[in-house]
Structures are given as C-alpha cells and as structure tokens.
C-alpha cells in the first residue's frame, strides 16, 4: 500500500534514511533586464477596486480601516522584476528590501528576521507526526 507524506508526496518507509545538510547556498541571480520602473513591481488593481468599494461603504471608520489594511494583501508582487530592481538599487534600498522579505540573499539573516521560521516549524511538525 502506498503511503504519502503531509505534502502529498509518495513515501516509502523502507527506503534508506536520507542525510540532510544544513549548508545552504544562495543561488546567484544574474539580472536579466534593465532596472524596471518601481510601478512595475506590484499589481495593485484588485486592491484598488476593494479600497474604492470599502471607502464608499457606510461602515464605521474603524471597520473601514481594518478592511483597507486587509485589502492590501491582494497586492501581487512580480519577484522577477523585484530581483532586477534590487540588483540595481542603492545599498539602503537593498537592505530595506531584504528586511521586507522581498528578496532573500542571506539565509542566516532571513532566519533572524523570521522569514524561514515557518518552513522550520513545518519540518518540526512533520518529524513529530511521522518520526522521519
């Protein structure tokens, strides 16, 4: 009988235990295009439609503010263009883009900032559930 792990991947419990390395190397990204215009990095069209609808609603201001904050999660980031933008930006901009999680250049820094924490939590939960 086939077994599957929590990610839906087939798992063979008789398979020899695999060894994992904690050594992680960042891939080298070579910019492909000229620095894009800042407005090309994010599609906000759905966000703008929601904001307009929220603003014209009769809701109390505190509810509008909450919904406006939530609507911003519908922004769609173009990470290929973000990478090209990052590669051609000032050190200050690059640092803030890294802190915002728009790019991950240094895995240790990403762990410190909490961007890799979820992946580690999933791995720990999997190990507890399946002991592999």
Image (spheres, helix red, strand yellow):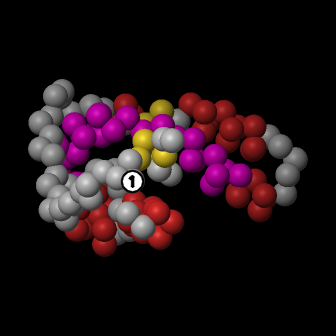
Check the image and name the residue furthest to the top. 33
| Dominant secondary structure (helix, strand or loop) of the stretch shown in magenta | helix
Please state if 9 lies on the left or on the right of 47 as rendered.
Answer: left
> Would you identify the image quadrant in which residue 88 lies?
top left
Inspect this view and state whether residue 92 appears: no
Residue 46: image location, x then y, percent: 60, 33
In the foreground, 44 or 77: 77
Report if residue 58 lies within the magenta region: no
Q: Image quarter for residue 124?
A: bottom left
Residue 38 x, y percent position in the rendering: 34, 37
- Is residue 82 magenta-colored? yes
Q: Residue at x 78, y 58 (%)?
A: 63
Residue underneath mark 1: 13
For residue 5, side relative to residue 113 (left or right): right
Judged from the image, the secondary structure of the residue bearing numbered disc 1 is loop
Q: Nearer the viewer, residue 80 or 20?
A: 20
**Is residue 112 or residue 31 the one in the foreground?**
112
What's drawn in magenta, residue-wise?
67-96
Q: Position of residue 122 (x, y in %)?
A: 45, 62
């Amino acid at each position: 009988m086939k077994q599957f792990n929590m990610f839906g991947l087939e798992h063979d419990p008789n398979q020899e235990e695999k060894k994992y390395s904690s050594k992680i190397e960042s891939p080298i990204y070579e910019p492909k295009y000229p620095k894009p215009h800042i407005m090309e990095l994010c599609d906000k069209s759905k966000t703008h439609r929601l904001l307009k609808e929220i603003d014209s609603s009769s809701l109390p201001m505190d509810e509008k503010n909450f919904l406006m904050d939530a609507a911003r999660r519908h922004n769609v980031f173009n990470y290929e263009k973000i990478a090209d933008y990052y590669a051609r930006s000032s050190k200050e901009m690059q640092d803030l883009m890294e802190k915002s999680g728009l790019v991950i250049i240094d895995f240790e820094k990403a762990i410190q900032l909490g961007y890799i924490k979820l992946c580690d939590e999933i791995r720990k939960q999997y190990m507890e559930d399946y002991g592999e």
